[in-house]
Image (cartoon, coloured by chain):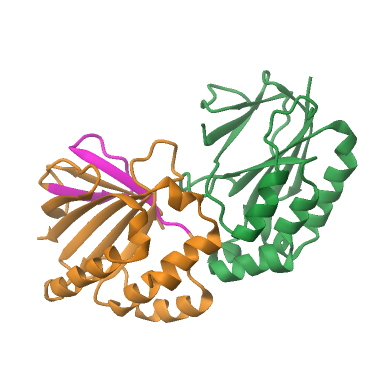
Chain colours: A green, B orange
Amino acid sequence: MSRLFYFSAGETGEWRIRSIEAVAGGGLSAACRLEVSSDAPRDGAWSVRGIVSNQRYVTRVEHSRLVPKQEPPGRAQATHGALIPIKKSPEWWALTQDERREILADRSRHIAIGLEYLPAIARRLHHCRDLGEREPFDFLTWFEWAPEHDPAFDELLARLRASEEWRYVEREVEVRLERD
Amino acid sequence: MSRLFYFSAGETGEWRIRSIEAVAGGGLSAACRLEVSSDAPRDGAWSVRGIVSNQRYVTRVEHSRLVPKQEPPGRAQATHGALIPIKKSPEWWALTQDERREILADRSRHIAIGLEYLPAIARRLHHCRDLGEREPFDFLTWFEWAPEHDPAFDELLARLRASEEWRYVEREVEVRLERD
């Protein structure tokens, strides 16, 4: 029932880090392995943390379409993964709820696009912005899929990054992972 | 520019505690003074903390009505205050965004009611639920007003507590304060 997760890069962890790419803004340093845990790490190259929260934009109608197709992280066949930390701009956070919903859901189709890749690509969103005042990212999105869905994941990322919502992303790192 | 605030009860602090009432669920223990600070307290009777975040329900139209009437905490004449920690039920958090907005804004008129008491009653909302996994409250609302507006503040509280939204409040404490 944990909601708070630490993603800690270093020498140990279930996931092997295949690549770390700075998509926008500053990146994260190279490391071999990634540990996902509810406990704060004691050492390592870097660590980011986020908390699973209530949904901020999804309507009941959308929720009822998403839930039957969603599967949780941890499926045996889902040996490929990605951690994508994102920070949005002050302009994004100064928008009102209706404006953010319109950009995210209506104009960028973020929710509808994600739905197309379920259940193949499991996704869990973690919020960081309100964990404290000096968090380096606003969100951490965790993805898991079976290797045959690699092209689908690439396509999902490309579609989201081409959306109007992504104009408000000022920092983004893509950490690609593989589970032994 | 702090967003994270600690409200710490004990022997010291700018505010004298006039009363602490458990409105719903468990209360908070008696103390003499309340300190509001961006620094974690070292000791004292109890401490609660919350972070100022982006607005979750307000539309641009509502925002444009609220902003010209809002005044920040700290006005010299605003010597009466209240801290109201609230925890909402799991049922509230399981609602989708459109359902919460409908209950809070449309059916309970939370935003419209608050607007009626501006600028007399200054208000600052702090979020706690996503600071960690074991926070005792979901929100801390801070109010400040001049003594002649005591009846208005009582009325504001009574109207909000009579709303449909308040059916989802499972813990609420009312801490009344006075500044010397």
Q: Decide: is A150 above or below B56.
A: above
Give the magenta part as a residue range.
B33-53
B173 or B96: nearer the eye? B96
- Front-most of A94 and A117? A117
Most foreground residue, A40 or B76? A40
Residue A89 coordinates in the image, percent (x, y)? 61, 60
Q: Is residue B110 visible?
A: yes
B14 on left or right of A162: left
Q: How many marks?
A: 0
Residue at point 45%, 72% (across, down)? B106
- Measured as percent of width and height from the top left, residue A129 is found at 53, 49
Residue A36 colored magenta? no
Question: What residue appears at the point 69 percent right and 50 percent down from the top-left corner?
Answer: A66
Is B71 drawn above or below residue B171 in the view shown?
below
Residue B142 percent across, percent down from the top left: 28, 59
Q: Is residue B164 above or below residue A82?
A: below
Quarter holding the C terminus of chain A is top right
Is residue B35 on the magenta stretch?
yes
Image check: B180 left or right of A63? Answer: left
| Percent coordinates x, y for residue B123 in the rendering | 31, 66
Can residue B56 be seen by looking at this rendering?
A: no
Would residue A89 appear left or right of B89 to someone viewing this image?
right
Would you say A140 lies left or right of A135 here?
right
Q: Residue at x 51, y 25 (%)?
A: A39
Q: Is residue A146 above or below residue B130?
A: above
Q: Quadrant of residue B43?
A: top left
